[in-house]
Image (cartoon, rainbow, N blue to C red):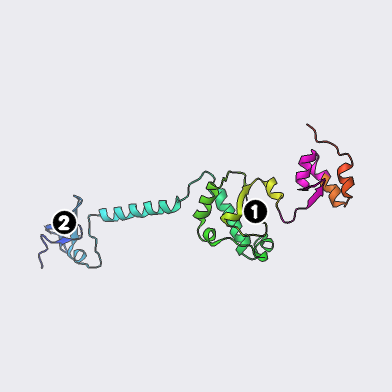
Amino acid sequence: MVDLTGKKFGRLTVIGRVEGIRPPHWHCKCDCGGARNIKTGALQDKSRKNHSCGCAKIESIAKASVAAKERNTKFDHPHKNHLKWTFRNMVNRCHKPGTRRYERYGARGISVCDEWRFNPTAFYNWAVESGYEYGLWIERKDVNGNYCPENCTWKTPKEQANNTSRNRFIEWNGKRLTVSQWADVLGVNQKALQHRVDRNWPIERIFTQPFRRLSE
């Protein structure tokens, strides 16, 4: 039997043979200060390049855990889940046929820029840097343009409704506003104003016939 005393395998240095054990085992000291008894075949197995007392495995698991944590915490924000939901829906309605509202986005040629689509973290970082707060929704400045940094901002649901491609603008006294905006200006109920518009009242009558004022 070959004497392995004094030889080094990975982090283990062979101190001597362990008597009375079959198959033959060797008592080894690890670079970390630990010790381990290991059989001849395992020591000479060339596929095992990092022999140790067990510390190498522990270190490997720790490194993997740190790496996984870094991958999962590249973006940290109290409302991370809402932004993830926003991102997922934005991509789906532009690039996934059959998704709800796809016909209003992807089917019209509207897409998400590659910078965001293939790197969600880039989108999350842009969101925070551009003023994102919980309760705001992503809005395209040009309703016919794509989702990209230069064409997007954050708006309240009401502000967003005023920019939708389906919203109707009304011009009166030199101002061109949406029904919602006119309701705010006039201090009237939006539904009442919308009712007049839907019934195709003449513009003059829409604005001159008295409304029931909103209660204070």
The residue positioned 75% from the left and 53% from the top of the image is 167
Q: Give, as a three-letter code, the residue at label 2.
A: Cys
Give the quarter of the figure containing the C terminus: top right
Provide the secondary structure element on which disc 2 rests: strand
Q: Range of the magenta residues?
A: 164-192
Where is residue 137 shown, x and y percent of the image? Answer: 63, 49
User: How many angstroms separate mark 2 from mark 1 (CA)?
Assistant: 69 Å
As drawn, the residue found furthest toward the top would be 216
Q: Is residue 173 magenta?
A: yes
- Classify 103 as above or below 208: below
Where is residue 62 shown, x and y percent of the image? Answer: 33, 52
- Taking the image as shown, residue 183 lies to the left or right of residue 61, namely right
Give the quarter of the figure containing the N terminus: bottom left
> Callout 2 environment at 10 Å: few (<14), some (14 to 19), or many (20+)?
many
Q: Along the line of sight, which residue is nearer the eye, 185 or 15?
A: 185
Q: Along the line of sight, which residue is nearer the eye, 71 or 139?
A: 139
The residue positioned 56% from the left and 47% from the top of the image is 130
Image disc number at residue 117: none
The residue positioned 61% from the left and 55% from the top of the image is 151
Q: Give, as a three-letter code, the residue at label 1.
A: Lys
Residue tagged by mark 1?
141
Residue 108 falls in image quadrant: bottom right
Image disc number at residue 28: 2
Where is residue 127 shown, x and y percent of the image? Answer: 55, 49
Where is residue 200 shown, x and y percent of the image? Answer: 87, 52
Q: Along the line of sight, which residue is nearer the eye, 32 or 29?
A: 32
Q: Along the line of sight, which residue is nearer the eye, 61 or 209?
A: 209
- Taking the image as shown, residue 46 lies to the left or right of residue 115, namely left
